[in-house]
Image: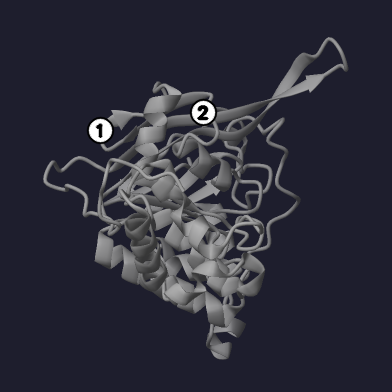
Amino acid sequence: MTTATNASTVTPVKADVTSGQPLLAVEGLKVHFPVNRGFILQRTVGHVKAVDGIGFSLKHGETLGLVGESGSGKTTAGRAILQLTKPTAGKVTFEGQELTTMKPDAIRKMRRRMGIVFQDPYGSLNPRMTAGNIVGEPLIVHRLFTSKAEYREKVAELLQVVGLSPAMANRYPHEFSGGQRQRLGVARALAARPSLIVLDEPVSALDVSIQAQVINLLQDLQEQFNLAYIFIAHDLSVVRHISDRVAVMYLGKIVEIATRDEIYKNPLHPYTKALLSAVPAPDPVLERKRERIVLKGDIPSPLNPPSGCVFHTRCPIAIDDCKGDVPPLREVGPEHWVACIRV
């Protein structure tokens, strides 16, 4: 194993919050994928507008839940923020530095401060690497140890932090359960001392009983290390437990942003109301009394999104004006933003 010369403790450091500036600011972020035709002389015949002009900010130690149907652009947005997918347009300012104009070497250095936990705890881990090597890989990439002994010590500490035994370091991924594999993914994301972690549906592939354990772990780690999370999910009941604010995405656009309590008690956008109406209530009496909003049709293709408000083709309160200009995301209450002309 190659040792490094830039030593640092394995414990993630707390971010500097004295400046009052947001940790992350996203402005007009777009990710459009070209659609090409032709075998030899390829030509671009259109673009898939996976993310189409979203913006939000994130404070130190805050969790933003990013929710929406499959295909709404949540995962692409998360990858674009980390520059794993190159944005087509827009700005991503992280810890005061604009990422979209950075060169690859500079981006690599910034990634020490950013992490990601993937949805699939089975496919996101290299089956040929031991658990210790998986967790320790960021330490090698970012040169965060000076000796083999220090490397092993840091790997052991990371395993303990996520509730695994250091004795498991020599095991391979197939020897772990789904919940344990996701803990390995969390430990790997923590290794380089990040201040921001993108959680891409981290519990959707796990049993319900294991989901609660992983969510509790994430909350404990956030409090301990002052981490900021972007929590991507389609399960609104999970998002409610961990998020400080919630942003609702539909067809590449954010249609509503509000605090957790506000968006669950007072949803304003018709799409948000439809999503919340589909969440089962634990009280069977309340469940029978609740009005269920069933949306008509399927989500349109991002290759050819509707004009005006992208939700108007399925919206129960749409009018002709909704087919015109794209509604701006405007503040209708304290920390409550909605993109709808009917609100």
Nearer-the-camera pick, 122 or 67:
122
Query: In which quadrant of the rendered view does residue 295 lie?
Result: bottom right
Q: Secondary structure at mark 2?
A: loop
Nearer-the-camera pick, 169 or 92:
169
- Give the residue displayed 33% in from the left and 66% down from the top: 221
The answer to whether mark 2 and mark 1 are in CB contact below 8 A is no
Image mark for residue 96: 1
In the image, is residue 315 above or below residue 160? above
Image mark for residue 292: none
Query: In which quadrant of the rendered view does residue 220 lie?
Result: bottom left
Residue furthest right in the image? 39
Q: How is the image coloured?
A: one colour
Label 2 – label 1 distance at C-alpha: 18 Å
Left or right: 314 in relation to 198: right
Nearer-the-camera pick, 89 or 216:
216
Q: Position of residue 4 (x, y in %)?
A: 34, 42
Q: Is residue 290 visible?
A: yes
- Give the residue displayed 58% in from the left and 77% down from the top: 280
Q: Is residue 260 visible?
A: no
Q: Position of residue 194 (x, y in %)?
A: 33, 50
Left or right: 57 in relation to 316: left
Query: In which quadrant of the rendered view does residue 65 lie?
Result: bottom left
- Give the residue displayed 56% in from the left and 47% down from the top: 75
User: As shown in the figure, which amino acid type bears the numbered disc 1?
Assistant: Gly
Q: Which residue position is annotated with label 2? A: 87
- Neighbour class for label 1 at 10 Å: few (<14), some, many (≥20)? few
Q: Position of residue 97 (x, y in %)?
A: 29, 30
Q: Secondary structure at mark 1?
A: loop
Nearer-the-camera pick, 203 or 121:
121
Residue furthest top in the image? 41
In the image, is residue 228 above or below residue 204? above
